[in-house]
Image (spheres, rainbow, N blue to C red):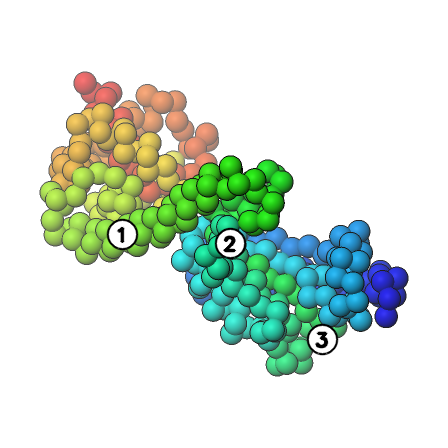
Amino acid sequence: MNKNDILEEFDKNKSLYDSLCSKTEQLIKELLNANGIVVHYISYRTKDRTKLRDKIVRKGNKYSSLNEITDVAGIRIITNFAEDVNKVAEIIKLEFDIDLDNTIDKRNHAEDKFGYMSMHYVVSMLKNRLKFTEYKPYKDLKIEIQIRSILQHGWAEIEHDLGYKGAKGIPSEFKRDFNRISALLETADKEFDRLREELSSYNTQVIKDITLKPEEFNINNSTLYQFLEQNKSLKELNLKIANFYNVDLNDNLQDINFGELSEKLKLQGIKTINELNNLLEKNKDSVINNFSKVANYYGNTSSNVSGVDRSVGLHSIVDWININV
């Protein structure tokens, strides 16, 4: 099959490859979500016809059919952390049929090559998945899946914009600079992994000890999150305020601006969770009994308040104190 025959085959099947990309992206998103893995983004593309033609010409007589070109369809997965590249890779290995001959971990480059690249899988749908009607059209079709961290991706994009890809063609007087920047980014990737692990350990400690040793924890996003999650007095105050406005209490802690709340408390001289707890216990009854005064001060009524979140009680206590200074 010559170049024109392969391109004709591509034109005939392009919509099928487009569908393969879309369906594979949807499947990967579902798999990542089921495994609790959050990534920066996932994108897909069917190879541009001009680039496909150039590749066929560049490779000479290598290809005898379109199916032998393994990157006609492509998925790119960008993770927030380098450590997550391996987690995503494990899912891909379990959920797809891997073409081992064309799969490569470009992170394991030779020492004389510049930079670090991504994990590249060439895969097809598993046989048991092809039994389902929605996947049957993709039998024997391959798709390339690239996985890399956001820093790896950023470097690859910058490298491309500078006009270089890998070690090829870099002027000798600039190669040291390229390698130095690459090493810095690789170090940053590892440091972000380390930082995430240490923050996770800290959060675990906060969950365990915040009610037992509140004096040991300063106010920050992690400690405030757990205080709002665990403190029964605050929950009672929040519900009474929601009832006052006749609105629902938003239980989603992810919607709260913890930085703003933290600064508001620190301006009152509240620096530890123990001090915050004392502030709450000292003022909650006054706020409950006189909340109409707080609401009127800001012109808030049930007609212009559509909802409140779980930080409302702490904001109201600080407002109550300021009103009565």
Q: How many numbered callouts?
A: 3
* First in sequence: mark 1 vs mark 2: 2
Q: Is residue 264 visible?
A: yes
Q: Residue 5 vs residue 22: left or right?
A: right
Outermost residue, top direction? 325
Regarding mark 2 in the picture, which secondary structure is present there? Answer: loop
Q: From the image, tell me which residue sits under label 2.
A: 113
How far apart marks 1 and 2 lie (CA) works out to 33 Å
Residue closer to the observer: 224 or 288: 224
Q: Position of residue 152 (x, y in %)?
A: 49, 49
Q: From the image, tell me which residue sits under label 1.
A: 198
Residue closer to the observer: 4 or 127: 4
Regarding mark 1 in the picture, which secondary structure is present there? Answer: helix
Name the residue type under label 1. Answer: Glu
Q: Position of residue 128 (x, y in %)?
A: 61, 81
The residue at the point 52 percent across, 60 percent down is: 106
Q: Residue 115 vs residue 73: left or right?
A: left
Q: From the image, tell me which residue sits under label 3.
A: 140
Name the residue type under label 3. Answer: Asp
The residue at the point 22 percent across, 29 percent down is: 266
> Mark 2 packing: few (<14 Cα in 10 Å), some, or many (20+)?
few
Regarding mark 3 in the picture, which secondary structure is present there? Answer: loop
Q: Position of residue 204 (x, y in %)?
A: 24, 55
The residue at the point 25 percent across, 39 percent down is: 220
